[in-house]
Image: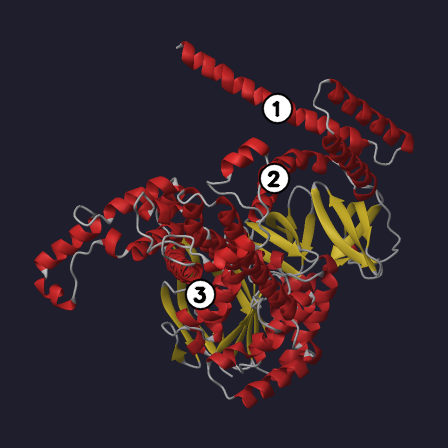
């Protein structure tokens, strides 16, 4: 009982701490934003207080020139921003967005910068102790980047094979997500009775934690007790002629790990697309279909000429997101094949990256590897958005 | 071009009766306007004709061919929708040629027909625009163009002007009238606006509660409304209705209630004797209230108090109070009446409408 109370107290104090931090940030920014169009004296006052603040830091022994100059630069930036960027605008939205923005900056920007730093140095098991003691790392230049393409990140599978596999994995997954989602959404949009129940059921696998869903599915692909093989065995018992078509129980996990991962991931991804496409379908006005009926379009012509073009604006962001998610999907592959001694046959870039960093402990190499993956994804996303932006422009 | 024939059409949604035994014959080249308040079943009637809804019972014939089971595309009709339903991802040209493209017309033929329609509707310069770049009136014209290129047997218009503002609506009304003169095709036009019905129609079909109330020329419907609903629905401003009894006094018949006693000459109500002492509704249009003292029937004049006068520019609406009964009259602008003044008037006996109080059917010729 007392342990419950003490942990409750811990949680509450933590919440209060966060609230206090947010309040401090808000107050600090507010004091800057509020006076953006006031006289210069207030800025001077602000700078004076900043210096005083730094001085207090010095007394407390935290002071360093680096911290102080960084702080000064930040303060100048903030004054500039609140004077020029916010001028004539309401500052409340910025104020409200600021804590989230700062939090994201701390959680995303700092690791990113550190990663860039790592990728140009050499951190591995042999240098990590030295780094811990002295804080210094041997500079490596672009050696790590060259190694990404020449030295396999895994025991045997090299970069280009992984890249090719990743692209195939992404394409196949997204293709079937959209196809399956489209078919299901079309069916669901026709269903009138118990609409809510079907739609809820459909989202369940997607709403479930991926770890649970994937591990459950992995069990179903077990060679002896899994649902898939049990069903194949039963089918063979009833229709022996199926064996002549080459259908036999298969060791899914050890013989076809990539195929198994693809099937599981397709199963996982369809609900999301279904929900998105269903929303899109419902936003299409019925009168277009009436008009198309009168113009003489059949079911598939309506699908091709009306539904598909009109669903595009909804579908495209979903496809872009799906592409990035699938490209980056480590969960399924790691959970299905990634246990110690697991196969390398199903690895894609990100799962190889994970193994390179945390199984083979090649940190700087992995940092460079991650940068390369980031560049690939970034260019995919940019070309996607460029492509659709151009299409939009071209039409207007 | 073609005739259309509705035979005993019944349409139900579950237990909701939308159309109750509608019989309607539309001749070749006829411009028929179906008019009624919202929910009267007029749009359903049109959608049944288009094949967008299924008939519960009855037959629809186009050109004497039963089309009940034909899909919309085989009925050779074209429809203009209330919200235009222009495909938003296609240019004006693509919108107009879509139906022909589906029918695999040769490209030159499609191009020719689109050009023709575009010329008629002055859309030549807009052919490469997207629907969202067009104004409401332009969209409306594209929607009509989409119908024209198909050279259908029957044009269906479903409240085509109700999404436009008043000024544009007037312009488009003239456009549609012109279009009819040019195409000379069979048109079925649905609207709730009786002004559109009066101005456009060759024949008006007034509907209410799924039943055809009256079917006749605009003048017929205006001058001789067959029941109180039609009388009240057609005409602007609305007809005045008075409830009372027929009374025989001296040698004459009178309409009488607590507020007034109105003389009814024999020619306006020959069957008065049959209804003597019975409840009736007397209807009189605001235009048929005579205020000009030179024209008043002085022997049987009525008097009332002027309540409010609305000046409309060229004329004014004069609200008269006769006892508890409010009566609207229309007079020349800047007449000599003013609020609270006493006014004397009589009715234009030629245009009195008398309805049975129970059946609401017209009982005078």
A94 relative position to B273: left or right: right
Residue position marked by numbered label 3 in the rendering: B22
Q: Are marks 2 and 1 on the same chain?
A: yes
Q: Quadrant of the N terminus of chain A?
A: top left
SS category of the residue bearing label 2:
helix
Circle 2/circle 1 CB separation < 8 Å? no
Q: Is residue A316 above or below residue A338?
A: below
Q: Toward which corner of the image does residue B184 lie, by quadrant?
A: bottom right
Measure the alpha-carbon separation of dots 2 and 1.
22 Å
Q: Quadrant of the C terminus of chain A?
A: bottom right
Marks 3, 2: nearer the viewer: 2
Closer to us: A180 or A254: A254
Q: Position of residue A71 (x, y in %)?
A: 75, 32
How packed is label 1: few (under 14 Cα within 10 Å), some, or many (20 or more)? few
Q: Is residue B66 above or below residue B18?
A: below
How packed is label 2: few (under 14 Cα within 10 Å), some, or many (20 or more)? few
Q: Position of residue B21 (x, y in %)?
A: 41, 63
Closer to us: B109 or A328: A328
Q: Position of residue A352 (x, y in %)?
A: 41, 51
Residue position marked by numbered label 1 in the rendering: A19
The furthest residue to the top = A2
Residue position marked by numbered label 2 in the rendering: A110
Q: Are marks 3 and 2 on the same chain?
A: no
């Amino acid at each position: 009982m007392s342990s419950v109370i003490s942990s409750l107290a811990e949680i509450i104090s933590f919440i209060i701490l966060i609230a206090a931090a947010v309040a401090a940030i808000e107050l600090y920014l507010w004091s800057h934003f509020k006076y953006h169009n006031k006289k210069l004296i207030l800025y001077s006052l602000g700078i004076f207080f900043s210096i005083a603040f730094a001085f207090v830091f010095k007394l407390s022994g935290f002071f360093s020139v680096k911290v102080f100059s960084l702080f000064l630069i930040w303060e100048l930036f903030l004054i500039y921003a609140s004077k020029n960027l916010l001028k004539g605008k309401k500052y409340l939205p910025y104020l409200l967005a600021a804590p989230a923005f700062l939090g994201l900056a701390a959680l995303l920007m700092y690791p990113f910068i550190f990663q860039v730093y790592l990728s140009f140095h050499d951190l591995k098991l042999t240098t990590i102790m030295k780094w811990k003691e002295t804080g210094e790392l041997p500079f490596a230049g672009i050696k790590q980047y060259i190694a990404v393409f020449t030295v396999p990140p895994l025991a045997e599978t090299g970069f280009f094979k992984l890249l090719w596999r990743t692209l195939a994995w992404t394409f196949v997954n997204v293709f079937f997500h959209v196809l399956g989602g489209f078919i299901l959404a079309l069916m669901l949009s026709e269903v009138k009775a118990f609409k809510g129940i079907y739609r809820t059921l459909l989202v369940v696998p997607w709403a479930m934690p991926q770890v649970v869903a994937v591990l459950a599915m992995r069990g179903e692909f077990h060679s002896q007790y899994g649902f898939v093989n049990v069903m194949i065995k039963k089918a063979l018992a009833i229709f022996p002629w199926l064996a002549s078509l080459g259908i036999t129980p298969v060791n899914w996990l050890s013989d076809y790990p990539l195929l198994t991962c693809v099937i599981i991931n397709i199963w996982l991804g369809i609900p999301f697309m279904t929900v998105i496409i269903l929303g899109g379908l419902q936003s299409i006005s019925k009168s277009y279909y009436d008009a198309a009926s009168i113009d003489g379009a059949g079911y598939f012509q309506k699908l091709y000429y009306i539904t598909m073009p009109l669903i595009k604006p909804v579908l495209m962001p979903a496809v872009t997101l799906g592409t990035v998610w699938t490209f980056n999907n480590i969960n399924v592959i790691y959970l299905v094949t990634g246990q110690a001694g697991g196969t390398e046959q199903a690895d894609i870039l990100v799962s190889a990256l994970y193994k390179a960093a945390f199984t083979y402990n090649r940190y700087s190499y992995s940092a460079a590897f991650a940068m390369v993956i980031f560049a690939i994804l970034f260019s995919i996303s940019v070309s996607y958005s460029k492509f659709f932006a151009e299409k939009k422009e071209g039409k207007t | 071009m073609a005739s259309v024939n509705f035979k005993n059409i019944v349409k139900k949604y579950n237990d909701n009766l939308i159309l109750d035994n509608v019989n309607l014959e539309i001749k070749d080249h006829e411009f028929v306007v179906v008019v009624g308040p919202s929910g009267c079943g007029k749009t359903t009637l049109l959608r049944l004709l288009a094949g967008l809804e299924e008939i519960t019972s009855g037959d629809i014939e186009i050109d004497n061919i039963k089309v009940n089971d034909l899909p919309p595309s085989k009925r050779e009709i074209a429809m203009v929708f209330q919200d235009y339903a222009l495909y938003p991802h296609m240019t004006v040209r693509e919108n107009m040629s879509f139906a022909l493209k589906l029918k695999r017309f040769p490209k030159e033929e499609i191009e020719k027909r689109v050009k023709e329609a575009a010329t008629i509707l002055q859309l030549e310069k807009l052919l490469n625009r997207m629907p969202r770049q067009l104004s409401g009136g332009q969209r409306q014209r594209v929607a009509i163009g989409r119908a024209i290129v198909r050279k259908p047997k029957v044009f269906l218009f479903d409240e085509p002007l109700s999404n436009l503002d008043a000024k544009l609506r007037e312009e488009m009304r003239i456009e549609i009238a012109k279009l009819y003169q040019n195409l000379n095709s069979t048109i079925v036009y649905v609207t709730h606006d009786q002004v559109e019905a009066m101005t456009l129609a060759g024949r008006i079909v007034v509907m209410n509660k799924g039943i055809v109330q009256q079917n006749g020329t605009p003048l017929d419907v205006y001058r001789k409304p067959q029941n109180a609903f039609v009388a009240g629905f057609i005409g602007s401003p609305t007809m005045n209705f008075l409830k009372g009894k027929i009374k025989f006094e001296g040698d004459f018949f009178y309409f009488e209630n607590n507020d007034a006693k109105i003389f009814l000459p024999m020619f306006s109500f020959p069957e008065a004797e049959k209804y003597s002492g019975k409840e009736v509704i007397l209807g009189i249009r605001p235009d048929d209230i005579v205020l000009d003292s030179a024209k008043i029937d002085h022997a049987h004049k009525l008097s009332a108090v002027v309540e409010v006068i609305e000046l409309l520019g060229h004329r004014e609406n004069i609200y008269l109070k006769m006892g508890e009964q409010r009566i609207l009259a229309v007079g020349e602008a800047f007449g000599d009446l003013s609020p609270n003044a006493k006014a004397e008037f009589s009715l234009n006996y030629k245009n009195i409408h008398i309805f049975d109080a129970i059946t609401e059917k017209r009982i005078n010729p």
